[in-house]
Amino acid sequence: MPEAVSQGTRINQSVIQLIKDDITDLDVDAFVFYAQSDLALGSGFGTAISVRGGPTIQQELENLAPVAAGEAVVSGAGNLKANHIIHAVGPKFREEDTESKLRTTVLNSLKRAEEKAVETLAFPAMGAGFYGIPPELCAKVMVDTITQHLQGSTVIKDVVICVLDTRQYTTFQNALGALG
């Protein structure tokens, strides 16, 4: 059971919900993994995906790599609860035009979800953590981009933003609260 769960914010026919949990353990159609361009499942959640999901995920990724920055590709999720993993290659902090690159990465993740008819989609705090994108910037860009997408025609019914810690949770809670 997640440690913290928001009530959810309705956008058009969809809902954005915020939780503090392990994204690899969620029962969703797909979740987004902030990947490296070579799609190697390295440390952190990459290890969790590899160990829990099994070797078929990395094998599938070998045929999809490399992926350009800002782009996203979809693989199966092996033995995980999700059906798909969207591997999104986003910016690292202090890259030129980080905000625009992050927006493009989130939008391309949403597009890949639409292509797979994903109804429940989970996002991590994209780039916050190991890649050094400040949580405030991450939350602003993600909430704005997801909200704009959900205001249009979409098959996505539920978006879960799944964060790791209280600081990220509070930051996203504030960004979602600003939606009114």
Image (spheres, rainbow, N blue to C red):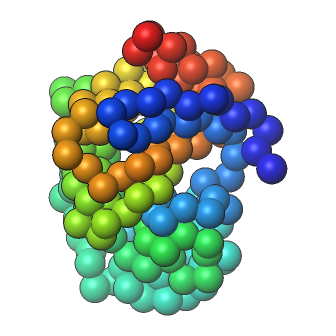
What is the x, y in percent for residue 28?
54, 61
What is the x, y in percent for residue 171?
55, 19
Q: Residue at x 31, y 66 (%)?
A: 117
Residue 52 higher or lower than 127, as above or below: below
The residue furthest front is 13
Residue 7 higher or lower than 41, as above or below: above
**In this orientation, does residue 146 appear?**
no
Q: Quick one: quadrant of the C terminus?
A: top left
Image quadrant assignment for residue 99: top left
What is the x, y in percent for residue 161?
52, 40
**Horizontal placement of 20 versus 9: left or right?**
right
Q: Which residue is drawn at 46% across and 45% down?
A: 159
Query: Looking at this view, is 123 or 97 the one in front?
Result: 123
Query: Looking at this view, is 50 or 20 the one in front?
Result: 20
Image quadrant assignment for residue 74: bottom left
**Horizontal placement of 176 versus 101: left or right?**
right
Image quadrant assignment for residue 96: top left
**Horizontal placement of 114 versus 160: left or right?**
left
Total marks shown come to: 0
Query: Looking at this view, is 131 or 172 the one in front?
Result: 172
**In this orientation, does residue 82 appear?**
yes
Q: Which residue is drawn at 54% across and 69% down?
A: 82
Q: Residue at x 57, y 20 (%)?
A: 173
Query: Looking at this view, is 85 or 95 the one in front?
Result: 85
Residue 150 higher or lower than 28, as above or below: above
